[in-house]
């Protein structure tokens, strides 16, 4: 097995950023009470995972239409995460500094995904 082999999507900067975003989301999830983990936490984790998973899957598609469909889902999932962060902030379940950082990270990821959509 080749040690340094990378899939094409692993070379995407936005994919790498989405993995860091997922790390932050899991950290938030671990800090939630059991009640919030079941409801809002699992939704947030699924949405964050969807960002990376759809980037990976879409990058392997041959047609522009198929690529754009997956990249669009990734974009939607990023926006879903931002909506959940808004709820977490309103419920005082996330610190303001972390909230602002995650919003900035989400904005950067969405801008990068728009770049992929416009390039494909």
Image: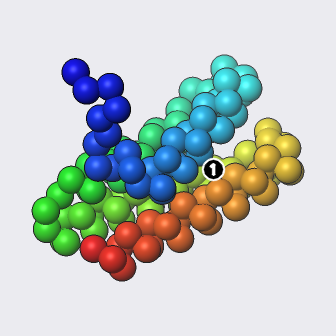
Name the outermost residue toward the left: 62
Name the outermost residue toward the bottom: 118
Above or below 95: residue 13: below
Please name whichever residue, 11 or 63, is drawn nearer the observer in this view of the structure.
Answer: 11
Quarter of the picture containing the C terminus is: bottom left
Q: Is residue 36 visible?
A: no
| 3 horizontally vs 109: left or right | left
Percent across and percent down for residue 3 are: 32, 25
Return the residue at label 1.
Answer: 84
Residue 93: which quarter of the image? top right
Percent across and percent down for residue 18 are: 51, 48
Above or below 50: residue 105: below
Above or below 118: residue 104: above
Percent across and percent down for residue 109 are: 54, 61
Q: Residue at x 62, y 65 (%)?
A: 107
Residue 41: which quarter of the image? top right
Please name whichever residue, 79 or 66, is drawn nearer the observer in this view of the structure.
Answer: 66
Q: Residue at x 44, y 73 (%)?
A: 114
Q: Residue at x 26, y 56 (%)?
A: 58
Please name whichever residue, 39 or 118, is drawn nearer the observer in this view of the structure.
Answer: 118
């Amino acid at each position: 097995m080749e040690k340094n082999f990378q899939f094409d999507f692993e070379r995407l900067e936005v994919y790498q950023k989405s993995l860091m975003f997922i790390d932050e989301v899991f950290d938030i999830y671990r800090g939630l009470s059991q009640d919030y983990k079941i409801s809002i936490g699992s939704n947030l984790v699924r949405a964050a995972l969807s960002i990376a998973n759809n980037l990976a899957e879409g990058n392997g598609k041959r047609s522009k239409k198929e690529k754009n469909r997956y990249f669009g889902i990734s974009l939607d999932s990023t926006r879903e995460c931002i909506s959940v962060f808004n709820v977490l902030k309103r419920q005082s379940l996330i610190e303001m500094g972390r909230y602002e950082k995650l919003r900035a990270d989400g904005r950067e990821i969405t801008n990068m995904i728009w770049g992929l959509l416009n390039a494909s």
